[in-house]
Image (cartoon, grey):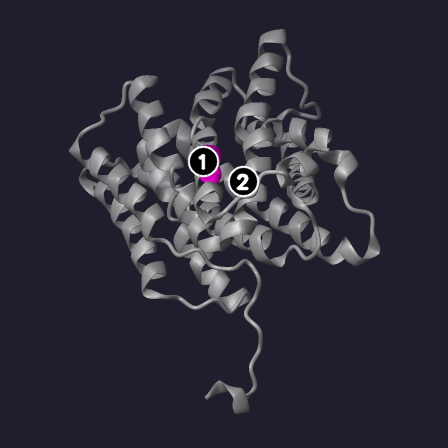
Amino acid sequence: MITRTLSRFRFGPTSATLVIAASAVCFGLVPLFVRELQGLGTGPATIALYRYGFSALFLLPFLPLDRKKRGGALLLMGAGAVFSLSLIGYLEALGSAPVAAAGVVYMSYPVFAALFAWVLLRQALTWRSFAAAGQVIAAAALLLDPSSLSPEVFSALVWAIPAPVAFGFLVVVLSGLAGELNSLERTACGLTGSIIGLLPLALQEGQGSVLPATGGEWGLILAMGLLTALIPQLMFTFACQKVGPVRTSAAGSFELPTMFLVGWWVFGEALGVREILSAILVLAAILVAPSISARPAEFRGPASAA
């Protein structure tokens, strides 16, 4: 039913890009819930499990059982598991580093998405691809001032680097390597893979239990699951198939200015000229990024290459 409802909307590149940007705003709210749960003594693997667990259970009936879809499903589960494990370092960074600094490290994922699309989908790295990636990198460079980072914060940011690498790969799998899976099936597979990867670590953190202790904690987890995982992930997965991995990554970078606002408004972090210029560069990258087909390029033999 949800897939049919989404399919009624005829998304072009522009509307699909706006949907991805709206999803990214929801993703940018993650620090609100992460720091609240960290304050209650919850570990990073358990927080990541909470974020995806509710959504994975909700979408469990949509896991594809058809044999011809099995390859794409297993690939997405694997990508989801790798991403969820890499996310632990990013969540740790959110607890010890400024939200803006952790955000700019994470927002380097468009570069990795473009590289994975080039390697796995044989999509050309055009000047617009390089320009969009360069603008995102420039936005990150503006905020990473070594003189203002303590060794502890710098170490936390280094451990956050695997998250954008893994998410860049996941974007390419979602938009171009998932075969015949529809949006709900893709989301269900990715989230299920995340749970498979995180559950053993979460059980270790909780000494055999991962259930929240209070009603307030249950409410916090439910809100985090709905606002930062289930709803935006469905929107993101459906729309990214319309524009390909490069523009998906650029529009998804809208998460960065959202994190700036969260850090400034909620946590009292500085929002100066550097932060504003970084946000402008990210928004410009959305306009520059090309809309590339999610399908791999057809192979042409030597005779047709000319």
Q: Nearer the viewer, residue 286 or 208?
A: 286
> What residue sits 50% from the left and 54% below the top?
244
**Disc assigned to residue 236:** 2
Please provide percent x and percent y for residue 166.
Answer: 51, 50
Is residue 21 highlighted in magenta?
yes
* Quadrant in which the N terminus appears: top right
Please provide percent x and percent y for residue 48.
Answer: 57, 32
> What residue sits 63% from the left and 38% below the top?
8
Q: Nearer the viewer, residue 162 or 71?
A: 71
Give the amino acid at mark 1: Ala
Label the magenta part by its dominant secondary structure. Answer: helix
**Disc assigned to residue 24:** 1
Q: What span is in magenta?
A: 19-23
| 233 relative position to 107: left or right | right
Q: Nearer the viewer, residue 66 or 138?
A: 66
Please provide percent x and percent y for residue 27.
Answer: 47, 32
Element type at mark 2:
helix
